[in-house]
Image (spheres, helix red, strand yellow):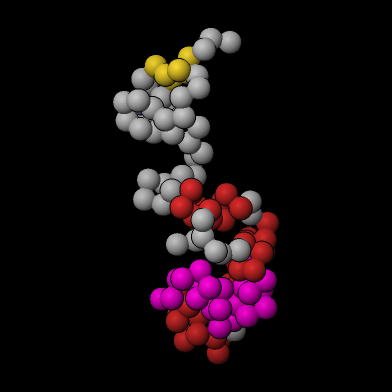
Amino acid sequence: MPDIKYCSKCGTQLDASAAFCTQCGTPTVAPTFTYTNNPSSAAYNSDKNRIAAGVLAIVLGGIGVHKFYLNQIGLGIVYVLFCWTGIPSIIGLIEGIIYLTSTDEVFFAKYVR
Ligand SMILES: [Zn+2]
């Protein structure tokens, strides 16, 4: 194994122990789900809990409680407005199952603001 690696973004040759590219600053072990405007490191510091969000979505998803919990207030209000149709309950159930079956990495990257 050579003691070097290459930046996935700009191709700069880097020391194998380098955590960040010396040229562009890209983390050398950047997971594919990391967005530049939503670094997972910040998301991991969140007080949100994937299991709690999933349970809320399944139990109270019909009135969008999980959306309010995830700070998606606008979407939460939509759920409340349409709760009488029963559709948000179905969507909430599905979302809850997705939350519970996702990994924490995927959950935080996708759903936590
Ligand atoms: Zn680079």
Give the residue furthest to the top: 2
Residue for point 61% across, 63% down: 49
36 relative to 107 in the view: left or right: left
Q: Position of residue 21 (x, y in %)?
A: 38, 27
* Nearer the observer, 111 or 47: 47
In the picture shown, does residue 55 fall above or below 5?
Answer: below
Residue for point 56% across, 73% down: 66
* Nearer the observer, 70 or 92: 70
Give the residue furthest to the left: 23
Residue for point 45% across, 71% down: 72
Magenta highlight on residue 62: yes
Task: Pick the quarter of the image with the C terminus.
Answer: bottom left
Q: Position of residue 44 (x, y in %)?
A: 53, 53
49 relative to 4 in the view: left or right: right
In the picture shown, does residue 29 fall above or below 79?
Answer: above
**Magenta range:** 54-74
Q: Quadrant of residue 13?
A: top left
Q: Work out whether residue 87 can be spotted.
A: no
Residue for point 41% across, 52% down: 38
Q: Quadrant of residue 75?
A: bottom left
